[in-house]
């Protein structure tokens, strides 16, 4: 699954996910399109909100196709 798919599975928009972890919607978009990669600390926050393990998070295909 991609980051986008996990986000959508939780019923969140990019802006909602960003608000929950303290990022702008544009940063979430950059993570989803592969132009930016989250830090370990941000990956932890994102995985907590998405309710997935860090292992699962780092195995994500960040680019939503």
Image (tube, grey):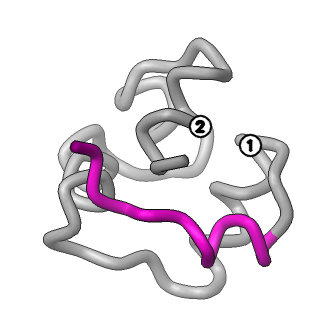
Residue 49 got which mark?
Answer: 1
Picture quadrant of residue 62 = bottom left
Residue that lies at the very extreme toward the top in this rendered image: 11
Residue 38 drawn in magenta: no
Is 60 included in the stretch rendered in magenta?
yes
Which portion, as a residue range, is magenta? 54-65
Query: Which element carries disc 2, helix, strand or loop?
Result: helix
Q: Residue at x 30, y 52 (%)?
A: 32
Estimate the x, y position of residue 33 in percent, counting from the top left.
Answer: 19, 55
- Residue at point 58%, 49% (across, down): 21
Disc sitting over residue 59 in the figure: none
Marks 1/2: CA distance?
10 Å
Q: Is residue 44 above or below residue 21?
A: below
When the figure is inspected, residue 6 is found, relative to residue 56, above or below; the finding is above
Question: Mark 1 against mark 2, which lies toward the viewer?
Answer: 2
Element class at badge 1: helix
Of label 1 and label 2, which has the lower sequence position? 2
**Residue that appears at 28% across and 46% down:** 64
Question: Is disc 1 in contact with disc 2, using a CB cutoff of under 8 Å?
Answer: no
Is 34 rendered above or below residue 51? below
- The answer to whether residue 39 is left or right of residue 35 is right
Residue closest to the eye, 50 or 59: 59
Residue 52 in the figure: left or right of residue 46: right
Q: Residue 16, position in %: x, y?
A: 48, 24
Up the image or down, 40 lies above or below 58; here it is below
At horizontal 54% and vertical 32% (from top left) the residue drawn is: 7
Q: Residue furthest bottom?
A: 40
Placement of the C terminus among the 4 image quadrants = top left
Q: Which residue matches tag 2?
A: 6
Q: Residues within 10 Å of mark 1 (few under 14, many from 20)?
A: some
x, y percentage for residue 53? Answer: 85, 64
- Mark 2, Cα crowd under 10 Å, few <14 / some 14-19 / many 20+, is some
């Amino acid at each position: 699954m991609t980051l986008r798919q996990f986000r959508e599975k939780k019923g969140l928009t990019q802006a909602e996910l960003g608000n929950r972890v303290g990022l702008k919607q544009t940063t979430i978009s950059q993570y989803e399109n592969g132009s930016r990669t989250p830090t370990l600390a941000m990956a932890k926050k994102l995985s907590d909100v998405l309710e997935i393990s860090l292992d699962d998070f780092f195995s994500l295909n960040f680019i939503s196709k």
